[in-house]
Image: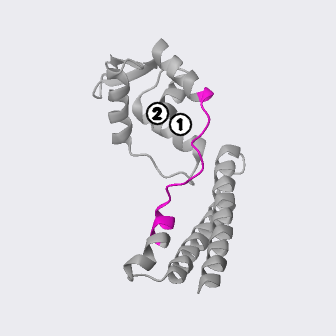
Amino acid sequence: MRLPLLALLARGPAHGYELKQDLEQLLGAAYPPTNVGQIYVTLGRLEKSGLIEGEEIAQESRPNKKIYRLTDAGREALRAWFEETADEPRVRDEFFMKLALAPRTGLADQIALINKQRREYLNTMRNLSKLAATEDRTNRISHLLIEGAMLHLQADLDWLERCQEELEDLR
């Protein structure tokens, strides 16, 4: 959450609730909603670390609000983030760990685990398809997010099929 908030502040000062709305509007309904409390906690940490500055703005009929702006250090952190590549492929995968350890425990069948995970992925795929059909067509970022998630799910489904083939050959 730290770096996306810095990125939103790169275009200009904003308060926490405004940043929440910007993020949700940009990413659409496919992205899990962000808790505004978490945004304010993160903004506080960014301010303490010198990546942003906050300024209290007095309001007549409401409590004061704090407007945040990016510092030079924040801009540098953001530049560094954009220069980095994304994380390596998932190697530490919880499902795979279950699959690998199941025979040693005698508590779960590997094929049953694969089938259960496959059902979960297919359910998620259906939900994303429904979401894509209802999402605002003009929000290309949201559609790209949904499409990326669906492509990852399809790859995961293909991988589950491969796992099942290999494990059935071992039986």
Q: Is residue 25 highlighted in magenta? A: no
Seen from the viewer's position, the closer of residues 166 and 82 is 166
Question: Among all residues in the image, which is located at the extreme top?
Answer: 72
- The reply to whether dot 1 and dot 2 touch (C-beta < 8 Å) is yes
Inspect the image, locate mark 1, and give the three-letter code of the amino acid beneath it. Answer: Asp
Image point 58% across, 22% down: which residue? 79
Residues packed near mark 1 inside 10 Å, few (<14), some (14 to 19) or many (20 plus): some
Q: Position of residue 144 (x, y in %)?
A: 69, 49
Q: Which residues are magenta?
A: 82-98
Q: Quadrant of the C terminus?
A: bottom right
Q: Is residue 125 above or below residue 52?
A: below
- Quarter occupied by residue 40: top left
Which labelled disc corresponds to residue 158?
A: none
Q: Position of residue 88 (x, y in %)?
A: 59, 45
Look at the numbered disc 2 and give the secondary structure of its residue: helix
Q: Nearer the viewer, residue 136 or 70?
A: 70
Residue furthest to the bottom: 171
Query: Which residue is at 47% across, 19% downward?
Result: 74
Residue at mark 2: 18
Height in image: 109 above or below 28?
below
Indicate whether residue 95 is drawn in magenta. yes
Q: Quadrant of the N terminus?
A: top left
Identify the residue position indicated by label 1 in the image.
22
